[in-house]
Amino acid sequence: GNSVTQMEGPVTLSEEAFLTINCTYTATGYPSLFWYVQYPGEGLQLLLKATKADDKGSNKGFEATYRKETTSFHLEKGSVQVSDSAVYFCALSDDAGGTSYGKLTFGQGTILTVHP
Amino acid sequence: DGGITQSPKYLFRKEGQNVTLSCEQNLNHDAMYWYRQDPGQGLRLIYYSQIVNDFQKGDIAEGYSVSREKKESFPLTVTSAQKNPTAFYLCASRKSSVLSGNTEAFFGQGTRLTVV
């Protein structure tokens, strides 16, 4: 079945530092890829997405590029802020058919803490 | 405003009791999902439904049951057979993948269930 693997956390950075959170996936079809963010005690919010190879998703200074050759979708931000502290989830959906049809598969999440 | 609403926000259950978590959406989405979130384990899929009157087991369905009698509603029952039900439960919905392709999911704010 499909799976998503995120880099282990937690990640602790100083404000204005560069952020990378690694995400790799395995899928039988041609998935769409997503990054979600979760603030304490809340549900998940979509941060960005990419639906095909070489697409770049971007939002609020965050970026991720869909790399089919390396099956990766790493999240980056050039200068983090304290308000970026949250849990980040990489996810995929594979709607091309097969046993994973309609499912959304998530990574284990990466806790990010940004200090002033 | 359209959205997805979970209730209650906090729920306490005694040993041996069944409890039902509510999930309602007014986004006109066909697909709905239930996830369980435990610390350090990310989101695990309990059940999902692509259309009314149809649903499939996810990865950890044992001890849970669902129904999908209306498009807007996807309640989750945590039965006494679930041995470790204390967790954060998240409901999500999205457009039908058959018609709309790989679309993102929208999440509720979650229900925190505690066994006392």
Image (cartoon, helix red, strand yellow):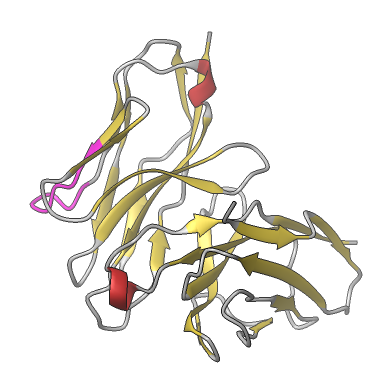
Residue A44 placed where, x, y %? 53, 48
Q: Residue at x 26, y 59 (%)?
A: A32
So how many labels did they put on this image?
Answer: 0
Residue B57 painted magenta: no
Q: Is residue A114 above or below residue B74?
A: above
Specify the principal SS of the magenta part: loop
| Residue occupying image coordinates x 37% and y 55% | A91
Q: Which residues are magenta?
A: A64-72
At 61% from the left and 49% from the top, the residue drawn is B39
Give whichever of A50, B80 is nearer the camera. A50
- Coordinates of residue B88 in the picture (x, y in percent): 68, 56
> In the displayed structure, does residue A2 sit left or right of residue A46?
left
Extreme bottom residue here? Answer: B53
In the rendered structure, does residue A71 fall within the stretch colored magenta?
yes
Q: Residue furthest front?
A: B1
Relative placement, left or right, of B28 versus B6 is left
Relative horizontal placement of residue B32, taking residue B90 as reference (left or right): left
Residue B10 in sight in this render: yes
B24 or B111: nearer the viewer: B24
Give the residue at x 44% y 59%: B105
- For this orientation, the residue located farthest to the left is A69
Q: Position of residue B98 (x, y in %)?
A: 30, 78
